[in-house]
Image: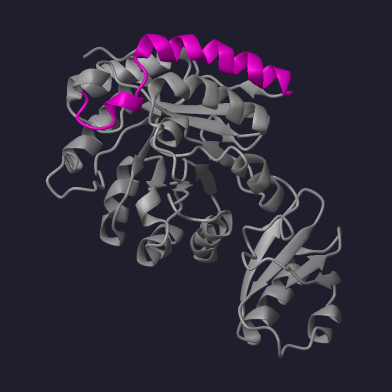
Amino acid sequence: MIIVMKPNSTAAEIGAVIARVQEVGATPHPIYGVERTVVAVVGETRGVDREVFLNLPGVETITTIGAPYKLASRESHPDDTIIRIDNIVIGGPEIVVMAGPCSVESREQVLETAHAVKEAGAQILRGGAFKPRTSPYSFQGLGLKGLEMLAEARERYGLHIITEVMTPEAVPMVAEYADILQLGARNIQNYGLLHAVGRVQRPVLLKRGMMSSMEELLMSAEYIMSGGNYRVMLCERGIRTFEKYTRNTFDLNAVPVLKQLSHLPVIADPSHGTGRWDAVPAMALAAIAAGADGLIIEVHPHPSAAISDGPQSLKPERFAELMPRIKRVAEAVDRTLSTVANRQPVPA
């Protein structure tokens, strides 16, 4: 249920509506728009008399949301959600590019990659300090040491950091180092983790599961938002099909569909979506043309020696060649490519 306030409603009137929602045993989620405020009511409301709210001062109307994902639905929030991280704006007219290695392997590797992706125009450095792997014998990440290396790269090159968090217990530690928390495809239905990131005020990149529907992705976003964290980005990273030529099938359909169903920013991951570095540029450009708000791309200085995901990683020079092409496609669809502010590296 959505309670739509009048354009000139006061803070006291909105507060009274919120209090009444709590009195009936539901949870209020106020959404402050440019022209008006709406209060999304989450919980069991079938037995609630709507007149209780309609008679309150400042209330204009009440509508019902058809989708099961109430807070993530565009019905509850017609305007696009804008996520701001210092000077970075995600979800607006600018395209944001996140780039870096799959795994943090060493200090030298992280700093070399950070310098390269910054020079090419990326704003956010990606890198895994904790790695969920299919085999328990595969490299699992450097943990805290990896987070410290990412933090050093941020300090030196002025890039923001996105890295994966895998367990509820690790959320406070990772949030201390990361600007964006990433939830990987394997954790899309890790409900304890979804609740945990919903309680911290860090932007979250939520990756679609390899066998998850778009509705399941949106329901996972709902878990996070119901905890009070509305700064969620949806990520299409490919789904598992019968095709063997690529690692996954990059579901380009999901980009415009998610933009229609939800107000949350949509980020495309052509690296995992294809599993082939030679297919990454084409899918990156296609995702921007389809309406994606940003890209997350794997870049490694020596892909053949990478501990994980080398075959899908671009060399720095190939990433640098791709960025002007992204800019041209963005401009063709009335967007712009956001680039990091010029900052001199901090001496080692």
Give above or below for 161 relative to 113.
Answer: below
Left or right of residue 231, residue 142 in this image: left
Asked which quadrant contains residue 41, the reply is bottom right
Asked which quadrant contains residue 77, the reply is bottom right
> Magenta residues?
306-334
Give above or below for 188 relative to 227.
Answer: above
Task: Please provide percent x and percent y for residue 298.
Answer: 37, 27
Q: Work out which quarter of the rendered image holds the C terminus and state it.
A: top left
Asked which quadrant contains residue 106, the reply is top left
Task: Please provide percent x and percent y for residue 262.
Answer: 66, 52
Magenta-drawn stretch contains 316: yes
Residue 58 appearing in the image: no
Task: Please provide percent x and percent y for residue 140.
Answer: 18, 43
Residue at image point 30% right, 53% down: 166
Instruction: Report the front residue among 263 and 348.
Output: 263
Instruction: Report the front residue among 262 and 41.
Output: 262
Residue at image point 58% right, 59% down: 215
Q: Work out which quarter of the rendered image holds the N terminus and state it.
A: bottom right
Magenta-drawn stretch contains 311: yes
Left or right of residue 240, residue 67 in this image: right
